[in-house]
Image (cartoon, coloured by chain):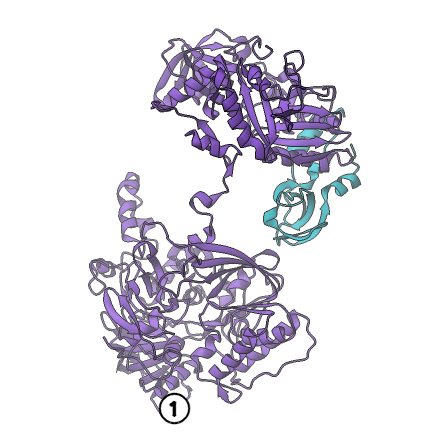
Amino acid sequence: MIIQHPLLGPRDSSEFVYLGDASLIDRPDWQAENAAETFYDYAYLRDNPAGENRELWFHEGGDRSWLVVTRNTVTHEISKVELACDVARMRGRSK
Amino acid sequence: MTQVNRLNGGQIDRTSTLNFKFDNRNFTAHPGDTLASALLANGVRLIGRSFKYHRPRGILSAGSEEPNALVELRTGNRKEPNTRATTIEMFDGLEAHSQNRWPSLRFDAMAINDRFSNFLTAGFYYKTFMWPAAFWEKLYEPVIRRAAGLGTMSMQEDPDEYDKGFRHCDLLIIGAGPAGLMAALTAGRAGSDVILADEDFVLGGRLNSETYSLNDDIAANWITQTVAELSAMPNVRLMPRTTVIGAFDHGIYGAVERKGDHLSAPSEGKPRQILWRIYSGRALLCAGATERPIAFENNDRPGIMLAGALRSYANRFAATPAQRVAIFTNNDDGHRTAADLHAKGVKIAAVVDIRPEAPLNGDYEVLRGAEVIDTKGRLGLTFAEVKLADGSNRTLDVGALGISGGWNPNVHLTCHQRGRPVWNETLSAFVPGDTLPPGLTVAGAANGIMSTHGALKSGAEAATHALDLKSDAIAIPTAEDAPVTQTPFWYVQGCSRAWLDQQNDVTVKDVKLSHQEGFQSVEHLKRYTTLGMATDQGKTSNMGGLAIMAEIAGKSIPQVGTTIYRPPYTPVPIATFAGRMRGKEFHPTRLTPSHHWAKERGAVFVEVGNWLRAQWFPLPGETHWRQSVDREVRQTRASVGVCDCTTLGKIDVQGTDAADFLNRIYCNGFAKLAVGKTRYGLMLREDGIAMDDGTAGRLAEDHFVVTTTTANAVKVYQHMEFVRQCLFPDMDVQLISTTEAWAQYAVAGPNSRKLLQKIVDPEFDISNDGFPFMACGNITVCGGLRARLFRISFSGELAFEIAVPSRYGDALMRRLMVEGEEFNVVPYGTEALGVMRIEKGHAAGNELNGTTTALNLGMGRMVSKKKDSIGSVLSEREGLNEADALNMVGVKPVNSADKITAGAHLMDASGPVDAANDQGYVTSAAFSPSLNCYIGLGFLKNGSDRHREKMRLVSPLTDLTVEVEIVSSHFVDPEGERLRA
């Protein structure tokens, strides 16, 4: 596979390490009352779609960026690649 | 032996003669021959014995689709089993042997299987060896395994090198026949970067096997001109002897280039084969078509071949399997073979055409509406029995029979991403469907365009279209353009021992049996009969098998469907996939800066991940590793020892939010750590399980140095980057791995300070007051060399870790040894390191084993509830905090001579020994020179409250039962007085 790195252009997937669902960015609030349940969902429950999926890849053999790759799990077509830190900020994460 | 069946003409170089051996007999050939063509030219038709019935077999095809003519090529450590004679390029001194026969090819004892063929049908093994069950492993399987298979391995190491490489192009053209050459010409002239790959050693594809003219000239001249023009283009790369084996994601293709297979041995220093990964903008499949046979009784005798292959041998290789030949066909292409062979002086006994309206010919007899119903000849064809249109029989006296059932487009690569070929009525064949791998288009015969003109034209058009070129079309050479229709004809009615898959010995009868027993879907048919599951992937057999299944099931072929092809297109040696990653090169070896010093000292090394670490340093006279390790431990605890700990992961953490960041990744607090201090830190996974531990030293307000375990260095760095980028993207913090930048040594023992004081520059006070336990700082040593000093201890002794830039590691180690002589300094390895940490009760990888929590490790109270850290929320789960949760404990034998074994389980002093009564297990064990007995660390239910309890340590697998006492995990200096000294 080829991943279009937003900063470095097309890179072979062998330079990357796969982690999993990009929902891992949405880490719950540790102080919320239902933190035990939300963290349980966060740590263990994943969708397993046949089709478009947003997932986290780490450019270990490159610039060490975490990327959010939108990939079709059926065709392996990659429709979007974003820096995970940008996605995290868009989703309200900061410090 | 002379080349009795050598014809005139052809693309062989008669000015040069090559000698080769087959089954120890000497033959001659010419450059341009394959092993198959050379054997035919020498009058050899019998090549091997079949897989199951040991039937005599010869050559079916002239290409990589060959199911039958498999040989052992070369001898000794270069012996290569199951190699297709049809693709072996001749070289001088070639040696090959037939396979699957004993004692000889002409007389094979196992041919008895053929007599029992009524029993050895599809599913024979499943049905026969069901009972008694115990016999399977001991008797049936070994016997079957011995009888099965074809060639044998050399069992020696492959002496050749294999390589891997990467190539890029705008257009990858797969196949250099008429379509591929025209496509390359079109794209090349337009200036695109082109790779043209073909599995053959000459370019031109099928044109080399035909007598067609192009532009009113012989095709060979057009090929020569075209290849010359392409060779001169800097933007075109020609790759003959290169098989594109698979179509992968995003336009990436795998290809195997055979650099040395046509030589007796690869050139000095050159690889034998190269596995290329080709990144293509677009790709064009011009893989041509494969002829399909017709099944009839005894259609597998040596001498019975595909008609197109006969034509290849005659036209390209100037060879024929026999001087009297018949053709059995259902289409016009079979007649071409007859005409070409006739022109070469081969006697055509008859053309047997199933069509009542078949074209007649003045030069030889055409038997219209006739069928071949049986053949004779024990080791090679002698007679073909023909049923004529009027119902009468006629026997043809022939040494070879060419069969043509039409041509199947080579759709293989179009299926590699789940694409399903579709049925074409005109051709009665599957052609590429709509769901091609993205970026791939198909041209020529592979796309069902069977005429030469059509192939040339479609190649040019496909390249123009794929690259979006200005339609400044180049001239298409004039060529034959006969329309092609193919009427399906798969097998002769009434036949049963008619072979479909000759490599796996599958007959028409087996397909019928499969249907009868309910295995009717193509996927079931394939697995039940093994049709198409041999190394040729059924290139010549699949269609026949599923057509017959369709007929029996009363369905159409498209209704029955087809199985799809997978990579690789043709078999690839495992060595090619391995490339240079063999033996020591399987993974990179990382050496620490003082590796050579350790080697000089005679260290025994151990692999830790990619690292090589000194395990112990034997002295002369020490015959057992325990002697060395016990000495290293005693000497360190008595005076001072030095251990290379460079391999520990080191991560530099800098930024105004660095302390905050560490607070998030460690479960314990770091915000208040003073500059110049180090703290132990435990990292949890988000699920609350311990991930890794280490220390973090604060060198400045905004600068920490984090250490990780050797094994987890990469994983922890990745995790920290995840936390930084994905969870807290606005933190002002930067990370960099500095594992390779610093050589680091533990200097441990009561004299460690005295030793270090000899090398630390005098302006730095490392006395207990000036540099107390857990202090850290930047210092200089040996007169100005920058270094980092940490007062941390893994051994439990007064200890330091000192780091210098990597290039000074070797020098520092040597200096420490010299300066330490007065203290009787000892270098120690990972074994002594392990013994001392067990004696001290420090957890390591065995305890941080992916199942244990901070609570289990006795560090439950470290998990801060006042801050957010990874894993803190889920570490509070009920299930991880039950009253009888496992606690880390020490384990000592009651009888001090007894041994503690890691992996053994703890059971109550009395009562049953079973999983239901399991109380815990031992994770680490060692002989403790300090206590003079074995000791262990382990996890025990509610272990913190069970010190002094007597238990049994059991390992039912090894029949071990030892009486043990549960103790504190801190065997040595539990109060920690030594490390604060």
Residue B413 against residue B879 in the figure, above or below: below
Q: Which chain is cyan?
A: A
Going by the picture, which residue comes out furthest to the front? B783
Give the residue at mark 1.
B361
What amino acid is at disc 1? Asn
- Viewer-nearest residue: B47 or B140: B47
Q: Chain of mark 1?
A: B
* In-image side of B311 versus B231 (left or right): left
**Rendering coords of residue B836 (x, y %):** 49, 18
Q: Which residue is painted at 34% across and 69% down in the image?
A: B35
Q: Quadrant of the C terminus of chain B?
A: top right
Q: Looking at the rendering, which quadrant does residue B3 occupy?
A: bottom left
Q: Colour of chain B?
A: purple
Residue B427 against residue B639 in the figure, above or below: below
Is residue B917 visible in the rendered image? The answer is: no
Q: Quadrant of the N terminus of chain B?
A: bottom left
**Rendering coords of residue B950 (x, y %):** 44, 8
